Image (cartoon, grey):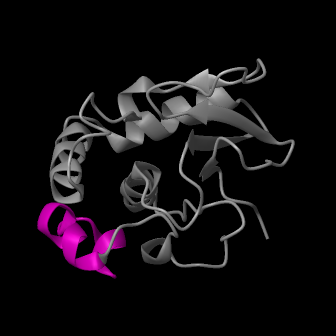
């Protein structure tokens, strides 16, 4: 089986050696070893730590609406380079809500390929372990087929 070209994980999850760490958080953890990149277009806004979950989802949907997912996927592939995968990283561990699950669903729908959480590659896209409850998603992401399956 060919591994997915784009995966998601926490900054603190060990990654396979074929992955380039690409932060989509507002910053990288202190003392993070060199060799990572940042994709700030996929980071949440300054409201990330104060917004309620429904507001967060609405605000982040607006960020994604202003971006071209195919162009972002191409940029991530170029960053990773030939024979490497892009690992999109944020802080929350698997099982807690994180915007990387929204990015994963958004990219998955555009590229027609699963964008899984590392260690959860067996799950369908709508089962990404960092998605918030389905009822909250439907208000802002009802047009996303990868999320509508929830």
Depth check, front residue: 33 or 8: 33
Give the side of residue 112 with respect to residue 49, left or right.
right
Residue depicted at 38% across the width and 61% down the height = 109
Which x, y percent locates residue 115?
55, 59
Q: Is residue 5 above or below residue 122?
A: above
Which x, y percent locates residue 118?
69, 60
Q: Which residues are magenta?
A: 134-150
Depth check, front residue: 49 or 57: 49
Depth check, front residue: 129 or 76: 129
The quarter holding residue 108 reads bottom left
Residue depicted at 30% across the width and 38% down the height = 48
Give the side of residue 29 with respect to residue 101, left or right.
right
Name, please, the residue furthest toward the right. 17
Q: Is residue 132 above or below residue 47?
A: below
Q: Is residue 139 magenta?
A: yes
Give the side of residue 47 with respect to residue 80, left or right.
left
Query: Mostly what secondary structure, the magenta segment?
Result: helix
Depth check, front residue: 78 or 60: 60
Which x, y percent locates residue 131?
41, 66
Q: Is residue 139 above or below residue 34?
A: below
Residue depicted at 75% across the width and 33% down the height = 82
Which x, y percent locates residue 40?
42, 25
Q: Quadrant of the C terminus?
A: bottom left
């Amino acid at each position: 089986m060919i591994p997915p070209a784009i995966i998601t994980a926490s900054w603190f999850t060990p990654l396979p050696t074929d992955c380039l760490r690409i932060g989509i958080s507002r910053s990288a953890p202190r003392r993070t070893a060199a060799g990572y990149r940042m994709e700030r277009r996929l980071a949440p806004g300054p409201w990330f730590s104060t917004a309620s979950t429904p507001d967060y989802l609405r605000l982040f949907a607006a960020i994604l609406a202003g971006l071209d997912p195919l162009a972002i996927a191409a940029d991530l592939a170029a960053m990773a380079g030939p024979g490497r995968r892009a690992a999109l990283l944020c802080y929350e561990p698997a099982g807690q809500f994180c915007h990387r699950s929204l990015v994963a669903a958004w990219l998955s729908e555009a590229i027609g390929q699963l964008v899984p959480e590392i260690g959860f590659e067996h799950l369908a896209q709508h089962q990404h372990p960092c998605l918030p409850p389905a009822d909250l998603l439907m208000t802002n992401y009802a047009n996303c087929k990868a999320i509508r399956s929830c």
